[in-house]
Image (cartoon, rainbow, N blue to C red):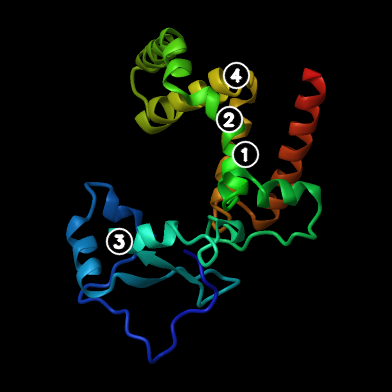
Amino acid sequence: MTDRNHPSPGMSFASPQPFDFMDLERFTIDVPHDAFRQLRRHAPVYWNPAPTPAIPDDGFWLITKHSDIVSIEENPALFSSHFGLTLADAPPATAGPPWSMVRDALTHLDPPGHFAHRQIVAPSFTPRAIAAMEARIRAVAIEVIEVACELGEFDFASEVALRFPVAVVLGEVLGLPPADFARAVHWSDVIFAPNDPEFPRSEGAAVVHEIYDYALSTMAARR
């Protein structure tokens, strides 16, 4: 949950051991269950600072109790996905077609729009549809492993953990050609990590327009 209004001094959300969800080093060995247990016990609604050069007091709310998460999921009128799912504000409705594509994407829609759009892609993910793809998915898995093994020494995250789902979802389900996999992954990285110092902030706008143009050209080619 993102929020540009951080807690006032009178609000107490401190835990005995402050937890920084953005510190990925805490997840390199295992899930920090003790830290989450402390949060659930002492600060189930926790303000996690995430300062940026542009917004020094920026951050987001971290919800750790199952009952609270369920309540949030069941109340889209108050906790709307349409305002954005990343650590950045959603584009305004007047931003133009490329930005509307991001704002009105499936994961950013609330009911009933989300359900209506989900029904369009749902047939591709039924048990019968997945079963029909099983042989091809197994072949992709074998191919990914064999290519990685031929390298001798490799980064498992990029060569296997990323490459396999990309080949299945983008290639087998969505029908993208392998030549477009790398830039599609890059687009995803930029869109879902808008404050990552690895990507210039100006790149986000360029990527949105690239995706929009790619979608238009792909649809035109398939007509």
Q: Which mark is residue 121?
A: 2
Q: Quadrant of the C terminus?
A: top right
Q: CA distance from mark 4 to mark 2?
A: 21 Å
Q: Which residue is mark 4?
A: 178
For residue 17, side relative to residue 2 (left or right): left
Q: Which residue is mark 3?
A: 67
Give the residue type at disc 2: Val
N-terminal label among 1 and 4 = 1
Helix, strand or loop under label 3: helix
N-terminal label among 1 and 3 = 3
For residue 36, side relative to residue 83 (left or right): left
Q: Which residue is mark 1?
A: 117
Give the residue type at disc 4: Pro
Give the residue type at disc 1: His
Q: CA distance from mark 1 to mark 3?
A: 27 Å
Depth order, front residue of 29/75: 75
Residue drawn at x 53%, y 56% is 86
For residue 115, side relative to residue 11 (left or right): right
Give the residue type at disc 3: Ser
From the top left corner, tell me how far across and down residue 10 is, in percent: 38, 92
Q: CA distance from mark 4 to mark 3?
A: 42 Å
